[in-house]
Image (spheres, grey):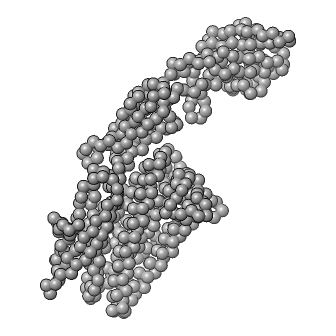
């Protein structure tokens, strides 16, 4: 009988889980731990590609053997399978070449995909893939579309066809926080760390191999495999996931490429017979690291003989992890609300809790608000998650707590059209009339990152006569005093005065003296 390769749900679950993990990571600040996580995922995907390639090669060998045995019946199917393999090889190698180009852009001409130096480079992937001159990203999308359309024409099963269309979809992507849809290549490679872009391309190769395997399996099913004597049996390990969080379970199906449903093989893993006859192997993941296991299957035959088929595989246990990023900066400011994004890959937001050691941390919808208490003391955010019904600590992230930076003082006035304007040091000259109509002095932090107003409590104006003698007028509050306004009226074009000793208080309650303003009268 032909090999039954339809049961790929464990592998597909693995791919879906990895893709969710990657997507969540890409939306957050990339720490060294996350970069290492991408490297581990990349290694796992490459091993998975090797396993899938072995499976696909086994199907090709079976088709070749049948076509040699019965050319009239098996020859046309083997020819189609050969064409599928060639188209897959061309697209797979194209993706491989793009990975090398991205790494060489980041690390130089000697860049090695297997040992990336500048893993956090956010520009190289976009330069290589989104360059409007060569349009490599667009060309890759079109090649994937052509391959997907070609492959799906060979598959009659609607469920399989839909699965392949989803795996190789290049539809525009809805990016959170952006109204318009993004092209597939922009969503994949714009502002993407090199290690993430390479991992995404390896995942694409995995999808391509998966589509090839489904197609080859379909072609094999079209052959009356019952006419062919099975002369080779191979053992395969199909894990649900090669990456297991410590405390979770590793699960894999161990099966033969050709199976007689009336006679199940005996399966031994690390010398012990499996307790079930479905080929499901489970073990509790303890310490983190890479773990290998091997075993064999014993298959009885009708003549009373038993053949033995060996297998081996591996899995990786990773430590629990969570990603915490300050929305504004890598520090927290005392006295104000600091937006924080907290997530745990694979865990819903409702299953995540967090605490802070210095101040308060409250949830607001899908986000968090941190309000540190003491300046100069670290604020440690501890994240926990509900994993399989158990509460587990996922990570601790330390933040420095700083006081708010000093704001910039400025004069508020209206221009000739009545528009509100700000006059700061270095702004040039201000009309005397606008100066006299000004309500006074204000101060704020406005650097496109923080936008915080301060209350001005007092300030001084310093005027100099022709002899260089200084005359100081003081104002209590933010408004110009009458004496100050009178002095403005007597000033001539080109004269200047200074506003100094500006006292202001911010939301943190700290009073500070701000930098002076030089004012030139027009």
Does the rendering let one see residue 143?
A: no
Q: Where is residue 292 in the image (x, y as percent from the top left)?
A: 31, 64
The foreground one among 385 and 478 is 385
- Seen at 51% across and 18% down, the residue is 509
Task: Farthest residue to the right: give it.
Answer: 466
Placement of 379 over or under 39, stated as above or below: above
- Disc count in the image? 0
Does the rendering let one see residue 325?
A: yes
Q: Is residue 124 left or right of residue 64?
A: right
Q: Where is residue 388 in the image (x, y as percent from the top left)?
A: 26, 48
Q: Which of the 4 image quadrants contains residue 351?
A: top left
- Seen at 54% across and 56% down, the residue is 117
- Seen at 32% across and 41% down, the residue is 393
Placement of 252 over or under 363, stated as above or below: below
Q: In this view, does 314 lie to the left or right of 429?
A: left
The foreground one among 190 and 403 is 403
Placement of 38 over or under 418, stated as above or below: below
Task: Farthest residue to the top: give it.
Answer: 483
Q: Which of the 4 image quadrants contains residue 205?
A: bottom left
Q: Where is residue 21 in the image (x, y as percent from the top left)?
A: 40, 53
Q: Where is residue 395 in the image (x, y as percent from the top left)?
A: 37, 42
Q: In which quarter of the image is the C terminus?
A: top right
The foreground one among 297 and 477 is 297
- Seen at 46% across and 35% down, the residue is 399
Q: Is residue 312 left or right of residue 403?
A: left
Q: In this view, does 89 lie to the left or right of 433?
A: left
Placement of 14 over or under 363, stated as above or below: below
Q: In which quarter of the image is the N terminus?
A: bottom left
């Amino acid at each position: 009988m032909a090999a039954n390769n339809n049961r790929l749900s464990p592998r597909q679950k693995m791919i879906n889980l990895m893709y969710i993990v990657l997507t969540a990571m890409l939306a957050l600040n990339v720490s060294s731990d996350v970069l290492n996580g991408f490297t581990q995922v990349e290694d796992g995907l490459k091993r998975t590609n090797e396993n899938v390639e072995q499976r696909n090669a086994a199907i090709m060998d079976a088709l070749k053997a049948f076509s040699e045995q019965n050319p009239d019946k098996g020859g046309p199917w083997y020819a189609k399978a050969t064409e599928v393999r060639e188209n897959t090889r061309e697209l797979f190698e194209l993706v491989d070449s793009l990975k090398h180009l991205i790494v060489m852009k980041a690390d130089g001409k000697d860049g090695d995909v297997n040992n990336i130096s500048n893993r956090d480079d956010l520009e190289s992937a976009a330069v290589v893939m989104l360059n409007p001159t060569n349009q490599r990203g667009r060309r890759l999308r079109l090649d994937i579309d052509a391959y997907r359309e070609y492959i799906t024409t060979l598959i009659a099963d609607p469920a399989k066809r839909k699965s392949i269309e989803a795996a190789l979809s290049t539809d525009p992507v809805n990016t959170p926080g952006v109204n318009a849809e993004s092209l597939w290549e922009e969503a994949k490679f714009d502002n993407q760390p090199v290690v993430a872009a390479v991992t995404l391309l390896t995942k694409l190769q995995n999808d391509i191999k998966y589509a090839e395997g489904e197609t080859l399996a379909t072609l094999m099913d079209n052959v009356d495999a019952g006419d062919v004597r099975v002369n080779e049996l191979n053992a395969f390990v199909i894990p649900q996931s090669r990456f297991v969080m410590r405390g979770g379970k590793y699960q894999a199906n161990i099966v033969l490429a050709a199976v007689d449903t009336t006679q199940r093989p005996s399966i031994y893993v690390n010398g012990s017979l499996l307790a079930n006859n479905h080929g499901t192997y489970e073990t509790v993941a303890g310490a983190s690291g890479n773990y290998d296991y091997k075993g064999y299957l014993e298959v009885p035959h009708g003549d009373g003989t038993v053949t033995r088929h060996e297998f081996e595989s591996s899995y990786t246990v990773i430590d629990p992890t969570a990603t915490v990023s300050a929305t504004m900066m890598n520090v927290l400011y005392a006295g104000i609300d600091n937006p924080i994004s907290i997530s745990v890959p694979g865990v819903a937001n409702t299953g995540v809790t967090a605490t802070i050691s210095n101040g308060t941390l409250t949830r607001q919808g899908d986000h968090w608000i941190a309000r540190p208490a003491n300046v100069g003391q670290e604020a440690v955010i501890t994240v926990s998650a509900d994993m399989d019904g158990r509460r587990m600590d996922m990570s601790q992230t330390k933040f420095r707590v700083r006081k708010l930076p000093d704001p910039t003082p400025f004069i508020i006035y209206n221009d000739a059209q009545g528009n509100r304007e700000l006059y700061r040091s270095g702004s040039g000259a201000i009309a005397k009339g606008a100066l006299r109509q000004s309500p006074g002095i204000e101060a704020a932090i406005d650097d496109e990152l923080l936008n915080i107003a301060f209350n001005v409590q007092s300030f001084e104006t310093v005027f100099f006569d022709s002899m260089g003698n200084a005359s100081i007028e003081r104002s209590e509050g933010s408004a110009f005093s009458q004496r100050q306004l009178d002095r403005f009226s007597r000033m001539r074009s080109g004269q200047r005065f200074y506003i100094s000793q500006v006292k202001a208080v911010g939301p943190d309650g700290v009073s500070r003296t701000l930098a002076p303003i030089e004012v030139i009268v027009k």
